[in-house]
Image (cartoon, rainbow, N blue to C red):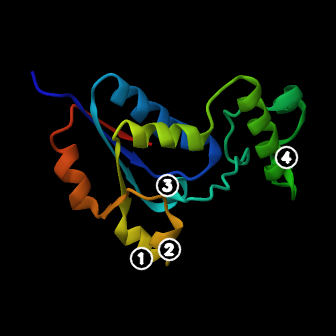
């Protein structure tokens, strides 16, 4: 029987959206899958050497708010200047308190498990990003590079 394959497209660059691709990829790799993640648009933020990921409660009605704020605090209030920083700090504290691995640790785990990470070269060019700002060991390619692998994958996820 041939090795199972998982292909993931990571398009989001916020703290809360950083977890799914790395958790799923590292878990699949631990289960013996061959895994590739294609990082495009804002997902490229997850590949930077220096991460400064934030979480935004604005436009995320499913996000549980601390202290029951979702019951009494208007959604518009999440747009108040500084609220994103406060929510990010609260989320990081909760992650630490619950013993959840950091994004850096999960990303390192993926590298150790030989998850192939592909940075979308078109997006790098579009946003004038610099290869030196990204972690080592990446491949740079376009959609065709992703499709070579995804076309033969057992599972393909868009995150």
Which residue is label 4 attached to? 86
Does residue 39 appear in this view?
yes
Residue at image point 77% right, 25% down: 97
Q: Earlier in the sequence, mark 4 or mark 1?
A: 4
In percent of width and height, residue 105 lies at: 56, 38
Residue at image point 28% right, 25% down: 32
Give the distance between the C-alpha atoms of the residues marked 1 and 3, in whole angstroms. Answer: 14 Å
Count residues near mark 1 (Cα–Cα under 10 Å), then give few for <14, some for 14-19, many for 20+.
Answer: few
Residue at image point 62% right, 59% down: 50
SS at circle 2: loop
Which residue is label 3 attached to? 43
In percent of width and height, residue 63 lies at: 70, 34
Q: Earlier in the sequence, mark 4 or mark 2?
A: 4
Which mark, residue 129? 2
Give the distance between the C-alpha atoms of the residues marked 4 and 1, in whole angstroms. Answer: 32 Å
Give the distance between the C-alpha atoms of the residues marked 2 and 3, in whole angstroms. Answer: 13 Å
Give the distance between the C-alpha atoms of the residues marked 1 and 2, in whole angstroms. Answer: 6 Å
Tell which of 98 and 15 is nearer to you: 98
SS at circle 1: helix
Which mark, residue 125? 1
In percent of width and height, residue 39 lies at: 41, 54
Q: Earlier in the sequence, mark 4 or mark 3?
A: 3
Tell which of 34 and 40 is nearer to you: 34
Does residue 76 appear in this view?
no
Q: Earlier in the sequence, mark 2 or mark 3?
A: 3
- In this view, the residue farthest toward the left is 1
Contact between labelled residues 3 and 2, with CB atoms less than 8 Å apart: no
């Amino acid at each position: 029987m041939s090795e199972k394959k998982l292909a993931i497209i990571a398009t989001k660059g916020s703290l809360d959206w950083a977890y799914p691709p790395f958790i799923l990829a590292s878990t699949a790799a631990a289960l013996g899958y061959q895994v590739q993640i294609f990082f495009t648009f804002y997902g490229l933020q997850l590949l930077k050497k220096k991460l400064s990921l934030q979480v935004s409660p604005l436009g995320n009605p499913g996000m549980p708010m601390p202290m029951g704020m979702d019951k009494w605090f208007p959604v518009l209030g999440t747009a108040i200047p500084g609220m994103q920083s406060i929510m990010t700090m609260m989320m990081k504290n909760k992650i630490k308190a619950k013993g959840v691995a950091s994004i850096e640790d999960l990303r390192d785990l993926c590298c150790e498990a030989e998850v192939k990470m592909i940075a979308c070269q078109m997006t790098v060019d579009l946003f004038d990003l610099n290869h030196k700002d990204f972690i080592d060991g990446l491949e740079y390619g376009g959609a065709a590079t992703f499709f070579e692998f995804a076309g033969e994958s057992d599972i393909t996820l868009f995150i």
